[in-house]
């Protein structure tokens, strides 16, 4: 007899709880609500900390779908619906998507952790009556560069990533991006070289800190993907509505080390993944522009260059 949807949901939920606890090195606490009336399958917090928990909505598929131009391309395809009045952009609500491998009895690699407001913008959606259907289609290939690739997390890294999210999340939901009707669009104006200046900006404290550093031409130190980065931020904005900063890393470590002064020292950093951000006032590395076009940001908020400078002619962000 085939597993029912309820049984599959329970397996996915229990596997998430076990994986989060196992990979959290004793620092993760997880709870399951008695009733899932608020769209949260799990509440996750730091062990013995009083800071509020983050909510996780768990979506698991037991199959992958073949597709794409190349042979062997596999996709994680998950569809779900919400009542229109339940589509709330809460910065403390995240979605977890994964493929459950019945042979391995565990999640496949990669899984995905996406903040609710970001997911509602990235996923394909359609409205039927008073419900909105969302579809996530993520390419599971290791070389994929689709819209979901930056939200990947390996099962072995789940606990660490959850702790980073908890540490960076605002204390309340008051910092959420204002909710828009399903038919709404963001009004923006075009700028040079195809970038867009958006008038709707994230309001959380970390974004504001980075924004002030760009305007004041102050460098930053921060942890990013397990590496301490010291960098001068040049552009701040969004890529697919997700905040990013383009900076020149002049010290620290990285997955791709580059000598000082090298064009490979440009870094495209996702704001949500920056932790322990500190301003280094009076420190600035004014590096010359390269010949390529940056692909880090498609909607520019602020830039460290003067308006008369051709601000987008930088090396493609590493």
Image (cartoon, rainbow, N blue to C red):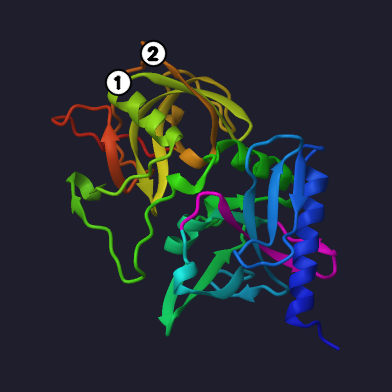
Q: Circle 2 — which element?
A: loop
Residue 298 location (% of width, % of height): 32, 49
Q: Residue at x 63, y 54 (%)?
A: 55
Q: Are marks 1 and 2 in contact (CB under 8 Å)?
A: yes
Residue 228 lies left or right of residue 248; in this view the side is: right
| Residue 105 point in image, percent of width and height | 85, 65
Q: Between 180 and 303, which is closer to the camera in this rendering? A: 180
Residue with the mark numbered 1:
216
Q: Is residue 133 left or right of residue 294?
A: right
Q: Quadrant of residue 17?
A: bottom right
State the count of labels.
2
Residue 124 seen in the figure? yes
Provide the residue designation for mark 2: 281
Query: Which portion, as a residue range, is magenta?
Result: 89-109
Please, what secondary structure does the residue beneath circle 1 have? helix
Quadrant including the N terminus: bottom right
Q: Earlier in the sequence, mark 1 or mark 2?
A: 1
Q: Position of residue 236 (x, y in %)?
A: 34, 37
């Amino acid at each position: 007899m085939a597993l029912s949807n309820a049984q599959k949901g329970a397996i996915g939920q229990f596997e998430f709880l076990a994986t989060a606890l196992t990979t959290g090195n004793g620092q993760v606490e997880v709870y399951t609500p008695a009733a899932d009336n608020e769209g949260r399958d799990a509440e996750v917090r730091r062990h013995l900390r009083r800071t509020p928990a983050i909510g996780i909505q768990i979506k698991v598929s037991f199959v992958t779908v073949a597709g794409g131009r190349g042979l062997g391309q596999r996709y994680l395809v998950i569809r779900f619906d919400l009542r229109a009045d339940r589509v709330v952009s809460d910065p403390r609500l995240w979605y977890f998507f994964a493929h459950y491998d019945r042979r391995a009895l565990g999640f496949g690699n990669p899984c995905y952790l996406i903040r609710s407001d970001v997911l509602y913008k990235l996923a394909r959606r359609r409205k039927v009556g008073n419900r909105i259907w969302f579809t996530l289609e993520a390419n599971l290939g290791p070389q994929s560069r689709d819209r979901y690739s930056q939200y990947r997390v390996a099962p072995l890294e789940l606990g660490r990533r959850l702790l980073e999210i908890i540490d960076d999340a605002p204390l309340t939901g008051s910092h959420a991006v204002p909710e828009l009707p399903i038919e709404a669009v963001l009004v923006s104006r075009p700028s040079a070289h195809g970038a867009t200046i958006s008038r709707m900006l994230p309001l959380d404290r970390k974004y504001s800190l980075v924004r002030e550093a760009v305007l004041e031409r102050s460098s930053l130190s921060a942890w990013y993907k397990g590496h301490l980065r010291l960098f001068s931020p040049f552009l701040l904005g969004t890529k697919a509505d997700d905040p990013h900063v383009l900076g020149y890393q002049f010290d620290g470590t990285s997955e791709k080390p580059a000598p000082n002064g090298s064009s490979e020292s440009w870094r495209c950093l996702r704001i949500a993944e920056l932790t322990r951000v500190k301003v280094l006032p009076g420190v600035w590395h004014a590096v010359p522009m390269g010949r390529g076009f940056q692909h880090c940001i498609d909607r520019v908020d602020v830039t460290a260059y003067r308006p008369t400078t051709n601000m987008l002619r930088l090396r493609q962000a590493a």
